[in-house]
Image (cartoon, rainbow, N blue to C red):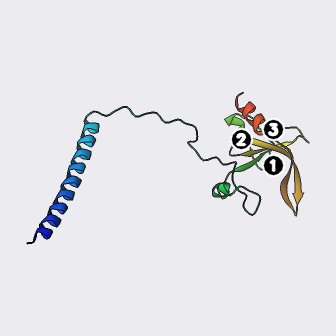
Amino acid sequence: MTDQQNTGAGAEDEISMDDWAAAMAEQEVADAAVAEPAAPDPLPANNLFQELSGGADSGGGVPSNLDMILDIPVQLTVELGRTKIAIRNLLQLAQGSVVELDGQAGEPMDVLVNGCLIAQGEVVVVNDKFGIRLTDIITPAERIRRLQK
């Protein structure tokens, strides 16, 4: 071998030894961290989730980052009223029986989404089907106030 080839091979060995030494040093640091786990620094909770209210509008005037939740199905319920009834009376119900509810005639119906009151409205008939015309939307502040009761 020539001197030029020897120095080239020596340089490769030197680079390889430096890489090997660096890898061994990293392994020692990792082993020390496993042997004595340090308490993780608590991360601040702010900015943990992406803000849904901001962002550029997509075609329908809805922020584009809301698009991912627009197809989630929810249960919409219109409640005429409620009552408590004993099992004895429940078993006596037959076709044509009338059950008295606590709602008054002409009183707005409650509109619930997944059990949470979001609006009130009045019953309408459209093409021989019942519907509800919303007359009052419950504000988010009012919903929170009702939850605290």
Quadrant in the picture for residue 70: bottom right
Quadrant in the picture for residue 112: top right
Above or below, 58 against 136 in this view is below
Near mark 2 (Cα within 10 A), the count class, few <14, some 14-19 or many ≥20, is some
Where does label 2 land, which residue? 116
Which amino acid, mark 1? Answer: Gly
Which amino acid, mark 2? Answer: Cys
User: Which of the marked residues, 3 or 1, is nearer the chain's N terminus?
Assistant: 1
Above or below, 139 against 7 in this view is above
Above or below, 5 against 47 in this view is below
Which label belongs to residue 29? none
Which label belongs to residue 101? 3
Q: Position of residue 32 (x, y in %)?
A: 25, 37
Q: Residue furthest bottom?
A: 1
Which amino acid, mark 3? Answer: Leu
Frontmost residue, 44 versus 121:
44
User: Which of the marked residues, 1 or 2, is nearer the chain's N terminus?
Assistant: 1
Query: Helix or strand or loop: what does disc 1 sit on?
Result: loop
The mark lying in front, picked from 1 and 2, is: 2
Where does label 1 land, which residue? 96
Q: Residue at x 72, y 37 (%)?
A: 89
The mark lying in front, picked from 3 and 2, is: 2
Q: Residue at x 16, y 60 (%)?
A: 13
Query: Label 1, label 2: how many angstroms apart (C-alpha)?
Result: 31 Å
Q: Quadrant of the C terminus?
A: top right
Frontmost residue, 61 versus 107:
61
The mark lying in front, picked from 3 and 1, is: 3
Q: Position of residue 47 (x, y in %)?
A: 58, 41
Q: Position of residue 22 (x, y in %)?
A: 24, 49
Query: Helix or strand or loop: what does disc 2 sit on?
Result: strand
